[in-house]
Amino acid sequence: MSKYYQINGLKVRVSDHEPNTSLRGSNDICLYIRSACNELLSIESQIEAVCEKRGYEISDFQEVINDWKDGTYDMHTFENANEEVDNDSPCKVVPDLIAQYRTSNDEKLKGYSLSRFAKHFEVKALSEKTGVSQSYIKKYFNIR
């Protein structure tokens, strides 16, 4: 869920997730109550950073600051009480996914060899044959 504000012609969105622009249109400013790693974020500091970067007056955002004072909300603010909270943080899963990706690509490249001076067309041909990205092939074979 999200909460929206209109401030000096700007659409300001406070949420716990990325926006679905096809559903509600775009926003001028997006503020988040939690990070991708499920860490609580400060709405006040985000507003300060946006105002400093874009030259806005922080006093214009007083309504948002009043609604989202630090310590008055937690990262589950938008969740229903009946929903179960998944304790698995996305950040804990990422290293495993990267390792699986590398292992899969390494397996696909076994039995192939390229000189570190291989030409673009050779890298491209191997990429098309194996389904491994050209950038991964270049790193794998140390091609410059």
Image: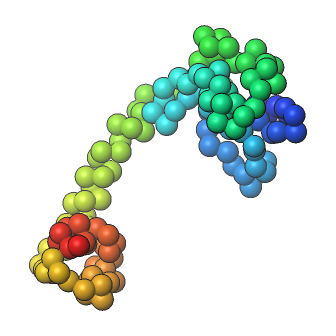
User: As drawn, is 86 to the left or to the right of 2?
Assistant: left
Q: Is residue 42 visible?
A: yes
Name the residue: 60% across, 23% down: 45
Q: Nearer the viewer, residue 85 or 2?
A: 2
Relative height, residue 110 to residue 124 (above, below)? above
Q: Point out the image quarter for the N terminus.
A: top right
Q: Is residue 43 above or below residue 90?
A: above
Residue 113 appears at what percent x and percent y? 13, 80
**Residue 81 seen anywhere in this rendered image of the structure:** no
Q: In the orientation shown, which residue stands out farthest toward the front?
A: 55
Residue at horizontal 20 percent and vertical 73 percent from the top: 143
**Residue 142 percent across, percent down from the top left:** 18, 69
- Residue at 65 percent across and 30 percent down: it is 52
> In front: 103, or 127?
127
Q: Position of residue 131 (x, y in %)?
A: 33, 76
110 left or right, relative to 5: left
Residue at 64% x, 36% y is 53
Q: The C terminus lies in which quarter of the figure? A: bottom left
Indicate the position of residue 129 as horizontal and vertical percent values: 29, 84
Q: Nearer the viewer, residue 11 or 83?
A: 11
Above-or-below relation of 34 to 143 = above
